[in-house]
Image (cartoon, helix red, strand yellow):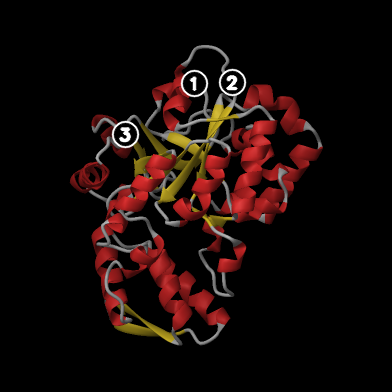
Amino acid sequence: MAGLTSQLFRSGLSALWFSGAARALAPWTAGKGAILLMHRVQPAAVHGPFAPNAALSISPDYLDSLLRSFRAASIDVVDLDEAMRRVEAPGATRPFVSFTFDDGYRDNLEFALPVFQRYAAPFTVYATSSFVERSYDPWWSLLEYVIARRASVHWATEQGEVTHETRDLDAKYRVFGSLSQAALQLSTAELRAQMRRFAQDHGLSVGDVAERETCDFSELSALRIGGATIGCHTVSHALLLRESDEIVRQELASARAALEAGLGCAVTHLAYPYGKRDHVGLRDFALARELGFASATTTRKGALFAVHAQHRHALPRVEVTSSFERSPHYLQTIVSGLPLLLWNRGQLAVVD
């Protein structure tokens, strides 16, 4: 969500907060609550000079400050089932937020869970089943891991293998950006094959990076016992809009079946990877509904309003990034709903 982390957007948030407009209009713009989108919780010290994925992470201290501030503001922290009950309830309800984490990183267990337990607060972790089973790696983490450790990397193209020099920090960031863009142009099957070859060409086995970074079934079970809800994030972290009906159905149904078998419990909530308008659409929302998921979240920006009771499979979220740690009023302003409505040009539910 590049817009939310840009300096221009942060300046706009500050203007809305310090002018008082965000707080004054919150009773009309905040809706019933919001679902927060995060990925990782890690101490800042773990990030070295080459950390292209660091924006996916917030610190444990910042997570603690968020929970403390919501409690002070009498905003309830609820799980997704309770969030849906409040969305569907007639009239006004107590304001709420629901914390969600994508992909299933091990740091959710190591660093996030103790913070949530300190406040007796629930949260949801959406797990990608192939990461849990070690049959695929988070491709963005695999790229970072290899580029960080090598002076050159090899990338297969239709014209043959291309070697990219990655001797210095600028080159590493440049190559990471270029290969990330190339990866996002591939279908799910093509990307899995490409990253399998990339791993093997650089001395790794498929699943090595997933083993380093993401939860296995025992760790997901520990999260669940500790108070987290485990949700589904597809088999392959697929960009669904590019895939056929059959592949999308398989990505959703097979992932849920694998997670339910490994955890011994129902998995009823879904998050679409790459959930913007050009990533997931009406076909995918309908399939999620048909497969019986209780809710499905996108990465479209927005608060939750009563109208979302009719759009449980196209729910918006508010992304929380490390850039928000610089000032606590950034997220407070967004949760007021005003910048979200401005972003969506007044639309309460963005479902197209």
Mark 2 and mark 3 lie on one chain; the one further toward the N terminus is 2
Q: Is residue 47 left or right of residue 250?
A: right
**Callout 1 touching callout 2 (CB < 8 Å):** yes
Residue type at mark 3: give it. Thr
Q: Position of residue 1 (x, y in %)?
A: 53, 51
Q: Cα distance, mark 1 to mark 2?
A: 8 Å
Q: Position of residue 91 (x, y in %)?
A: 55, 12
Q: What's under tag 1, amino acid-wise?
A: Arg
The quarter of the displayed image where residue 293 is located? top left
| Amino acid at dot 2 | Arg
The correct choice, above or below, for 150 with respect to 214 in the image is below
- Look at the image and tell me in which quarter the C terminus lies: top left
Tell me, yes or no, if residue 318 can be seen here: no
Return the disc, 3 or 1, that comes first in the chain's sequence.
Answer: 1
Considering only order in the chain, which callout, 2 or 1, is on the residue closer to the N terminus? 1
Q: Position of residue 148 (x, y in %)?
A: 48, 78
The secondary structure type at the circle numbered 3 is loop
Residue at 30%, 83% (x, y): give it: 161
Q: What secondary structure is found at the residue carrying circle 2?
A: loop
C-alpha gap between disc 3 and disc 1:
18 Å
Could you tell me how far apart the alpha carbons at marks 2 and 3 are, in whole angstroms? Answer: 24 Å
The residue nearer to you, when weighing 282 against 256, is: 256
Please name the residue shown 56% across and 67% down the image: 46
Residue 314 visible: yes
Which SS class for mark 1? helix
| The image quarter in which residue 43 lies | bottom right
Residue for badge 3: 268
Residue, disc 2? 94
Say whether residue 286 is left or right of residue 85: left
Q: Circle 1 sits on which residue?
A: 86
Q: Looking at the image, which residue sits at the far top?
A: 90
Tally the numbered discs. Answer: 3
